[in-house]
Image (tube, coloured by chain):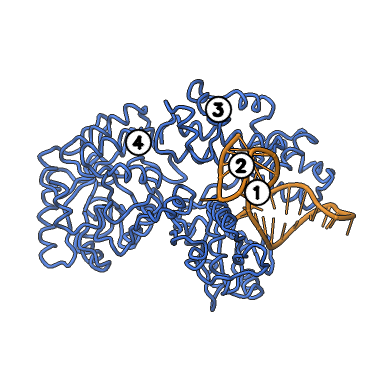
Amino acid sequence: MEEVNSRAAALLALMGELLEISGEDTFKVRAYYRASEEIRRLTRSIEGMTEEELLQVTGIGRAIAKKVQEIVRTGTFHELEEAKARIPSTLLDILQLEGVGPKTVRRLWQKLEVETLDDLEKAARAHRIRGLKGFGERREREILEAVQRRRTSGRRMTRDEAETIVRTIAGAFEGSGFEVAGSYRRGKSTLGDLDIVTTASPSAVNQRLRRTGCETIEEGESRTSVRCGEKRVDIRFTRREEYGTMLIYLTGSKNFNIRLREIALQRGMKLNEYGIEEKGKGETRRFATEEEVFTALGMDYIPPELREDGGEIEAVMAHRLPHLLVESEIRGDLHVHSSWSDGHLSLDQLAEAGAERHYQYLLCSDHSSTLGIAHGLDGEAVRRQISEIERVNRDSECTLLSGIEVDILADGTTGLSASVLKDLDLVIGSVHSAFKQDRDVMTRRIIRAIENEHIDIIGHPTGRILGQREPYDVDMERVIEAAKDGGKALEINASPHRLDLDDLFIKEARERGVHLSIGTDAHSAQELAYMRYGVMVARRGWCRPSDLLNTRDIKELLEFSR
DNA sequence: GCCGTTTTCGGCCCGACTGTTTTCAGTCG
């Protein structure tokens, strides 16, 4: 959120990592991680917060409150600077390796003077690691492999990449059900690995997995891990009558599980992935569904997308969890391209594809002509497209709305003139050039577009492309404020390569009452199905149906643009 | 380092799996 908040969150997390390597008490380490997470999620700026106000935030006590204030004043805090002087920061790269934790990092550093990935690779190749007590040949080889994997990949998966892997291994579960849990089920935009729960028999699955071409990492009766195309997949076997607790456990998040188990303890129960044990009774109650588990804990059901320990537990206790948007409430897609610019479908085919998805409308939003590569439309082409859309709409179940995705030029003006834009049903303004502008220039550029009376929606507001391009430097705080003042909408771009806005900004915009719209940015009929990703991140941002323009019927929608 | 309808001190989520262990520490989720 606020720049200073993310800085403080990063520094507190860094402190946690350094303390881990120093061999500090794990509870102290956890306290830093917890405080970091809380500050990252905070919607107000820590700048100007008093110590007493900071203490109101759960997970922040006297000591961390003072450090936070020191960060606001000086940009860092002295314990952190001391720790950094003591511990080489390059050790953090080693800590990130698969199978390498803080104790290992510390020993490699102190015994073998390993400080960098290069040092580690050399030590492994020279067989110096196997000489350490507690390490063997095998461990040395695994460390070396982890270093090499880091060098070749390490990038997180997009959701469509994850789905490809799921399709590859689905055959191994044939006959029995399986469900992808973990961050996938929580609707995260990118995924580090995949977690699968199944009631299938371990031996059958293990045997079939070997034929999928995935490499086995470990194999057991209750858990098996494989690597498919460099990505790790963890599979947990469970009995049908324990499915509910196992699914909760494997869906996470980790912090959510910790909170849930703490709540169970407070109520005299012990929760694990097999069930709930009433304290002192020694007898475990089992649950086939998640709903039953939440009920047993005295809670309403919490949808997976909210399970981040980001306020949902407090909300559910107060019975104030929002009714989240579901995909069937979406009445249309508010960002699609046709063959008039760089899309694959004609206007007739678009209308047909929309009707197949039972949509009332599709916003046809081709590029404007300033974007050369995309064969954009000029004013003349826009006029011809409008009359062509009128023709298509005469006998189509799904109405095409006339629109454009107009470039927001470097100075904040638009790539098409007002005389063209005024005749369109809805106008999306997007940044497609000059990404390197500094924060203030970029922010003012986008705000100028928001203030343009003809622009209704800001497309992919931060410009990120997952795993490829960082967001441009923009103060979303100010953009959200401007969108609120101007009554304009911010887009949730549902392309799995963008998912922009992200969930935290969605949540903030929603809380401030800013309109949001979901657009798939589809260039083909299949890509209209990206809507599910958009709904997923909207749910992660706590969106109710009324927060989205897409749930309006066509008449209400057009009122928005007036 | 944080926290309190058990507690202002003494707890802090819980279990699977691995390697090199002769009884368990480290890592992971």
Up/down of A176 relative to A378, above or below: below
Chain whose colour in the figure is blue:
A
- Residue type for callout 4: Met
Residue denoted by label 3: A67
Disc nearest the viewer among 1 and 2: 2
Label located before the other in sequence (3 or 4): 3
Q: Chain of mark 3?
A: A
Percent across and percent down for residue A428 are 23, 45
Residue denoted by label 4: A476
On-image quarter of the N terminus of chain A: top left
Q: Are marks 2 and 4 in contact (CB under 8 Å)?
A: no
Q: Chain of mark 2?
A: A
- For residue A313, side relative to residue A380 (left or right): right
Q: Which one is in front, A336 or B17?
A: B17
Residue denoted by label 1: A98
Label located before the other in sequence (2 or 4): 2
Residue denoted by label 2: A30
Q: Secondary structure at mark 1?
A: loop
Image quadrant in which you'd find residue A278: bottom right
